[in-house]
Amino acid sequence: MRKGTLYVFTGPSGAGKGTLLSRLRAEDDRLFYSISATTRAPRPGETDGVQYYFLKKTDFERKIAQNAFLEYAKYVDNYYGTLEAPVNEKLAAGYDVVLEIEVQGAMQVHEKRPDAVMVFIAPPSFEELAARLRGRGTEDEEKVRKRLETAKQELKSMDRFDYVVTNDEVGRAVRELHGILAKRRT
Ligand code: 5GP
């Protein structure tokens, strides 16, 4: 059986990765969307095992020691990581696997899996990113500021990716993502 393709979607918090990927996922049943582990607290409405596996710091660090992560990173004040076993299983079963992760983790995957398709989702502008992050209301002002500082660094890595998709309009950006997937499937 043909092995699946690994897709890495990255880009700063607030660029709209989640929105674009949930649309893509709803429209493409050959995609397996990896559920990350994190030490950050669940937001209202988030459930363990759905958006993330919410782990205590000690449990996350145990998994690091066990080499359970394909990649992991400290982002703002928390750990985030991709568990390797489910990704390998789904790829072997022929599914395309999607990781939605921040830039440091994306670069680790690029090193370990040079065949992974690397996609950077960019906001139309830094001002628009700040407005979206504040408008979302999921973080307090101090955390928003930290995310924006991180975003400045992340935006500098854009040219190291195979594709850069600007999320200026959701429908258009999703069509562009479908186009990227289609290229690999022909
Ligand atoms: P949030 O706290 O907004 O859910 O996520 C913060 C950032 O961590 C986002 O850029 C998100 O894409 C990233 N992220 C989520 N899961 C992972 C992961 O498994 N590994 C890495 N490196 N980043 C992740």
Image (cartoon, rainbow, N blue to C red):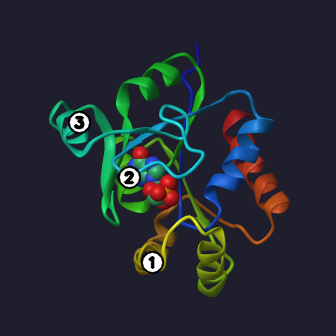
The residue labelled by disc 1 is 156
Establish whether ligand 1 lies closer than 8 Å to the Cβ of label 2. yes
Q: Nearer the viewer, mark 3 or mark 1?
A: 3
The residue labelled by disc 2 is 40
Query: Mark 3 to mark 1: distance in Å?
Result: 32 Å
Q: Residue 61, labelled with which disc?
A: none
Is residue 162 shown above or below 127? above
Q: Nearer the viewer, mark 1 or mark 2?
A: 2
Task: Specify the farthest residue to the top.
Answer: 1
Secondary structure of residue under mark 2? loop
Q: Residues within 10 Å of mark 2 (few under 14, many from 20)?
A: some
The residue labelled by disc 3 is 59
For the residue pair 177 and 84, the one nearer the viewer reads as: 84
User: Which of the 4 image quadrants contains residue 176?
Assistant: bottom right
Counting from the top left corner in percent of width and height, residue 35 is at 49, 36
User: Which of the 4 image quadrants contains residue 76?
Assistant: bottom left
Of mark 1 and mark 2, the one earlier in the sequence is 2
Which image quadrant: the N terminus?
A: top right
